[in-house]
Image (cartoon, rainbow, N blue to C red):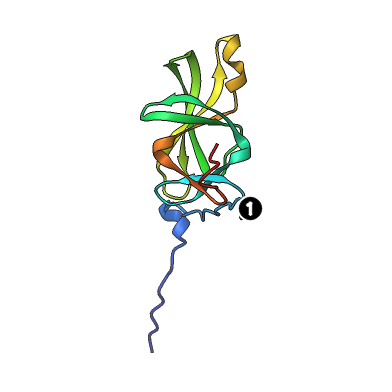
Amino acid sequence: MHFRMKVLENSSKHNTPKKQKTFQHYLPAGDRCYSCIHCRANLAAHAELISKSFQGSQGKAYLFNAVVNVGCGPAEERVLLTGLHAVADIYCEICKTTLGWKYEHAFESSQKYKEGKFIIELAHMVKDNGWDEQNDS
């Protein structure tokens, strides 16, 4: 009697990339926040908004102190309206849409306050949770 054995190879030998699970961060219910216009993932709490006076490649943009559900690409030097900066594109971790950029380094001393902050273009976000139609500042 002959038996045939089937040999199973470990999939790691084939260099197949492992898919990582993305865990979505939800900001507290009822708190005013900004979300991705494409997938509605929360991006930033209104309390983290620093300025509405920024310009992105697609129009108006907001500067935030902190964001959630956002990934960051590699930094590169770019000449922006306010001078030379090292910036990294940021994208929604859920739908992978490019949202804006993160200021990694400012070369001019007057622009240092932007370092570590995030720009999200209005074209890619919507207001969510607890916004009063009469008071949307």
Name the image quarter holding residue 104. Answer: top right
The one nearer the camera, 2 or 10, is: 10
The image position of residue 20, as x and y in percent, is: 50, 53
Q: Secondary structure at mark 1?
A: loop
Which quadrant holds the C terminus?
top right
Q: Is residue 62 above or below residue 27?
A: above
| Residue ID for mark 1 | 28
User: How many numbered discs?
Assistant: 1
- In this orientation, does residue 69 appear? no
- In this orientation, does residue 31 appear? yes
The one nearer the camera, 5 or 44, is: 44
The image position of residue 44, as x and y in percent, is: 56, 42
Name the image quarter holding residue 2. Answer: bottom left
Q: Is residue 8 above or below residue 99?
A: below
Left of 125 or right of it: where is 31?
right
* Residue drawn at x 47%, y 56% as measured from the top left: 12
The image position of residue 61, as x and y in percent, is: 46, 30
The image position of residue 111, as x and y in percent, is: 57, 15
Q: How many residues crowd mark 1 within 10 Å: few (<14), some (14–19), many (20+)? A: few
Q: Indicate the amino acid at tag 1.
A: Pro
Seen as rendered, the residue at the extreme front is: 134
Which quadrant holds the N terminus?
bottom left
The one nearer the camera, 4 or 120, is: 120
Q: Is residue 4 above or below residue 10?
A: below
The one nearer the camera, 45 or 21, is: 45
Seen as rendered, the residue at the extreme bottom is: 1
Q: Is residue 79 above or below residue 66?
A: above
* Residue drawn at x 39%, y 48% as measured from the top left: 38
